[in-house]
Image (cartoon, coloured by chain):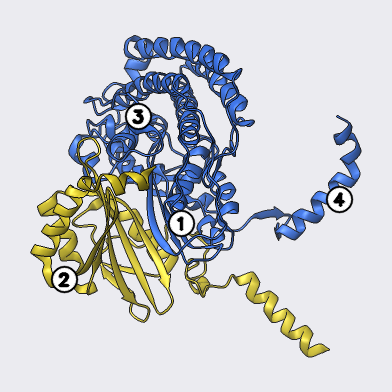
Chain colours: A yellow, B blue
């Protein structure tokens, strides 16, 4: 049903196109590309992580986007991607979910914290710090949030793709020992 | 005077779920609060990466016992968008009907809990009795009281039979009557007014700042509702009001939920009366094309967000869940400040918290003496086989 609507009512993408034009026009080289997969959904790809905060600031000041729905961390092989799911309030059927996407190198997974701009992001940045080890620079409080209090510092970041559970490691060691015994 | 910090929780400060608040007090008044919500992290996001999309429906259903339909709907509609499946109208209507009945049962449950926290246990008994009406309907439609298992990729798994329609309308009529009674009661009953009026104040600008969602935001006069601003399933065809309140306190959150139940009854009636004919689900393949999607849903507690990234195989590359309670914690910490210690349970309960939703994630652990045992699938299978060998005959005969 939804796919049909997009095909038949492309005029409905007006507000998304308007945001896209604003973003591309005002931010220009800071943004790599803007995608509109369907009505009320947008992806903004930020070119360099240094200019990422400017993009969020622009969305806040110019377009009044102040609602952070969530922040997703992604492990994509050689780098991390962080997705900021922002939402612009609007009247009926007017809201647009804008996802701002930034890539970080795995060797230096640091990014500017947006807590000073959007205080609602405070828990989500802590969660990504736990799960991926992505450090939001300037965050006021980076204690572990979701991982248990007795989580070892060497326990690692469980949502990274290369993370292996402690028990699994022990099992592998035991297997190796058994193998040698034979 | 030195600062006094008292722990509230993790043994159920409000609902019977674990969360810990470190509350700094000056005499009886709360000056600061800090929270620790890591007590029920189950590793579901990690686990989802090793399960197929079909298995994941049943996994995410178990994130929460109250709003299980929320999680499955939010997940399947994302996957459907990735696969480009067009869900038949009838499937969408049944999905929406279950969602609204779930909202009624969740809000009635919350009203009971709030009554209990106020010290008004009669309200608790009454609402939980009437909640059975909603649960009976859900059981009739889906076969289950909680964790309905009705959603699947491409539609729903069970149809509404012709004979059910009258029964559903009858029950909804009763529910409407009861909900109207509670709506009138909540605004006049002095016990409720004394405990809820002006307590847990969350002004509009603070609610926006902390990104509050759902009834918590709506009670602070923010007209936000995913069903209106980002319609999914059959909501575009329904006629309903967006309820807000400008009182910004617990009474406002109570009134918003009450009136929402009235609206939900209205919607359920519309859905069942205009139920389209036709198939309930579209055929699907097990492979999901590569891509990423953001799916939003208005849970009884507020906006729920799923991010699904697929890599073209049977298994998702990443599944991100942001349940509604999680979004409301910063607002709770703010609204605790300045109130009495005795108000803590009520203020926490006022967002309708669900800790399992909050921290979703790790490994099935049971503590067996000092030994920690992991219940893996093989263990559960052998355990199940053994159990049924011993008890099986009796079970089958019944």
Same chain for mark 3 and mark 2? The answer is no
Residue position for label 2: A30
Check the residue under mark 2 and report the chain it is in: A
Which disc number belongs to residue B386?
4
Check the residue under mark 4 and report the chain it is in: B
* Residue B21 placement (x, y as % from top left): 41, 44
Q: CA distance from mark 4 to mark 2?
A: 62 Å
Residue position for label 3: B237
Label 4 with label 1: CB-CB less than 8 Å: no
Q: Residues within 10 Å of mark 4 (few under 14, many from 20)?
A: few
Same chain for mark 2 and mark 1? The answer is yes
Residue position for label 1: A146
Q: CA distance from mark 1 to mark 3?
A: 40 Å
- If you read the primary sequence from the N terminus, does the residue marked by circle 3 or circle 4 appear first? 3
Of the two numbered discs 4 and 1 in the rendering, the one whose residue sits closer to the viewer: 4
* Residue A74 placement (x, y as % from top left): 40, 67
């Amino acid at each position: 049903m939804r796919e049909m609507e997009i095909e038949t009512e492309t005029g409905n993408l007006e507000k998304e196109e308007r945001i896209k034009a604003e973003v591309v026009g005002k931010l220009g080289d800071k943004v790599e590309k803007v995608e509109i997969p369907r009505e009320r959904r947008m992806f903004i790809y930020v070119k360099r992580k240094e200019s990422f905060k400017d993009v969020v600031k622009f969305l806040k000041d110019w377009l009044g986007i102040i609602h952070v729905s969530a922040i997703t961390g992604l492990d994509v092989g050689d780098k991390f991607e962080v997705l900021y799911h922002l939402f612009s309030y609007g009247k009926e059927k007017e809201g647009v979910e804008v996802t701002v996407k930034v890539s970080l190198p795995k060797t230096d997974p640091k990014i500017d914290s947006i807590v000073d701009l959007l205080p609602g992001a405070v828990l989500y940045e802590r969660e990504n710090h736990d799960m991926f080890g992505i450090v939001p620079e300037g965050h006021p409080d980076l204690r572990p949030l979701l991982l248990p209090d007795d989580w070892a510092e060497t326990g690692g970041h469980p949502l990274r793709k290369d993370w292996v559970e402690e028990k699994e490691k022990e099992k592998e060691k035991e297997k190796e020992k058994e193998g040698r015994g034979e | 005077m030195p600062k006094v910090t008292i722990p509230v929780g993790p043994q159920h400060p409000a609902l019977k779920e674990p969360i810990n608040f470190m509350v700094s007090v000056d005499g009886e008044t709360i000056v600061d609060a800090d929270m620790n919500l890591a007590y029920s992290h189950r590793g579901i996001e990690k686990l989802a990466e090793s399960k197929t999309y079909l298995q994941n429906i049943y996994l995410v259903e178990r994130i929460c016992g109250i709003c299980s339909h929320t999680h499955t709907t939010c997940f399947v509609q994302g996957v459907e968008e990735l696969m480009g499946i067009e869900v038949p109208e009838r499937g969408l209507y049944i999905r929406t009907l279950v969602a609204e009945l779930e909202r009624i049962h969740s809000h009635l449950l919350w009203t009971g809990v709030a009554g209990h926290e106020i010290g008004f246990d009669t309200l608790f008994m009454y609402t939980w009795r009437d909640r059975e009406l909603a649960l009976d309907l859900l059981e009739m439609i889906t076969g289950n009281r909680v964790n309905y298992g009705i959603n699947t990729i491409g539609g729903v798994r069970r149809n509404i039979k012709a004979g059910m329609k009258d029964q559903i309308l009858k029950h909804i009529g009763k529910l409407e009557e009861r909900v109207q009674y509670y709506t009138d009661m909540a605004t006049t009953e002095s016990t409720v007014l004394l405990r809820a009026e002006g307590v847990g104040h969350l002004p509009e600008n603070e609610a926006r700042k902390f990104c509050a969602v759902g009834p918590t935001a709506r009670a602070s006069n923010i007209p936000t509702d995913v069903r209106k601003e980002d319609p999914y399933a059959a909501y575009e065809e329904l006629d309903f009001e967006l309820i807000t309140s400008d009182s910004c306190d617990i009474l406002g959150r109570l009134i918003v939920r009450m009136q929402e139940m009235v609206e939900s009854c209205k919607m359920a009636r519309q859905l069942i009366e205009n139920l389209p004919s036709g198939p309930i689900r579209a055929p699907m393949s097990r492979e999901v094309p590569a891509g990423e999607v953001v799916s939003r849903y208005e849970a009884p507690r507020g906006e729920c967000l799923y991010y699904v990234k697929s890599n073209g195989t049977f298994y998702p590359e990443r599944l991100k869940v942001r349940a509604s309670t999680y979004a409301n914690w910063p607002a709770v910490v703010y609204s605790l400040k300045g109130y009495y210690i005795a108000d803590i349970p009520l203020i926490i309960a006022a967002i309708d918290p669900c800790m399992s939703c909050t921290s979703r994630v790790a490994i099935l652990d049971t503590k067996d003496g000092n030994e920690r045992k992991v219940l893996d699938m093989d263990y559960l299978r052998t355990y199940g086989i053994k159990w049924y060998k011993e008890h099986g005959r009796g079970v089958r005969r019944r």
